[in-house]
Amino acid sequence: MIGPVVMGRPVASKILQIGQAPGPYEGKIGQPFAWTAGKTLFKWYASLGVSEEQFRSRVYMAAVCRCFPGKNPKGGDRVPDQNEIAQCSEWLRREVEILKPELIIPVGKLAIAQILHTPRLVDAVGRIHRVEYFGLESDVIALPHPSGLSTWFKTEPGKTLLQRALTLIAEHPAWRSTFL
């Protein structure tokens, strides 16, 4: 993996967002979701009345892996392997232990798979899952990855499931107490 380590702000929050890994530009910029996928992600949150700055200052942003995994020879970013995921999992475990989040928002298949153990977005997005994650029971509302390469959230059933997930997030008590 290619440094530097990229992390969100040290925010004491009841909401934990977990992405896959930083992209090639996030290390230079110094924050997660700082490039194309971030523009889409923050448009989704803006539809809930929350600006990017509000989100970054009130939600703890983490990732399955903390460094850029490099480019995939077939195009796009390389998906971190199981060893890389395992090496970074201690960070997530400690963050969950410290924050005790009431709402976890995994973004993208890799992050979703770490928590919900489901390979299909249609089984994860658009519903609330009550799970035990690193020993803590929490609500999980998954979002698809906002990558410009993804068409899943632009076509059905992804379009409807994304809107349902955003509605569930907006109605969640942790979100309401954080932003209202």
Image (tube, helix red, strand yellow):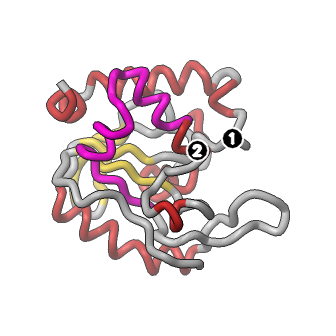
Q: Position of residue 10 (x, y in %)?
A: 23, 60
Residue 82 falls left or right of residue 56: right
Tell me, yes or no, whether the two marked residues, 1 and 2, touch with CB atoms within 8 Å: yes
Q: Residues within 10 Å of mark 2 (few under 14, many from 20)?
A: some
Q: Earlier in the sequence, mark 1 or mark 2?
A: 2
* 120 up-or-down from 1: above or below: above
Give the number of the disc on residue 37.
Answer: 2
Q: Which of the 4 quarters of the picture holds residue 148?
A: top right
Rendered residue at 35%/42% (across/down): 140
The one of 114 and 21 positioned closer to us in this rendering: 21
The residue lying furthest to the front in this view is: 29
Name the quadrant of the N terminus. bottom right
The one of 117 and 148 positioned closer to us in this rendering: 148
Q: Which of the 4 quarters of the picture holds residue 24?
A: bottom right
Give the number of the disc on residue 148.
Answer: 1
Disc 2, SS: helix
Alpha carbon separation for disc pair 1 and 2: 6 Å
* 46 up-or-down from 108: above or below: above
Give the number of the disc on residue 52.
Answer: none
Rendered residue at 33%/28% (across/down): 50
Q: Position of residue 45 (x, y in %)?
A: 41, 30
The amino acid beneath tag 2 is: Ala
> Which range is magenta?
40-63
Rendered residue at 38%/43% (across/down): 105
Q: Position of residue 57 (x, y in %)?
A: 26, 46
Residue 173 falls left or right of residue 156: left
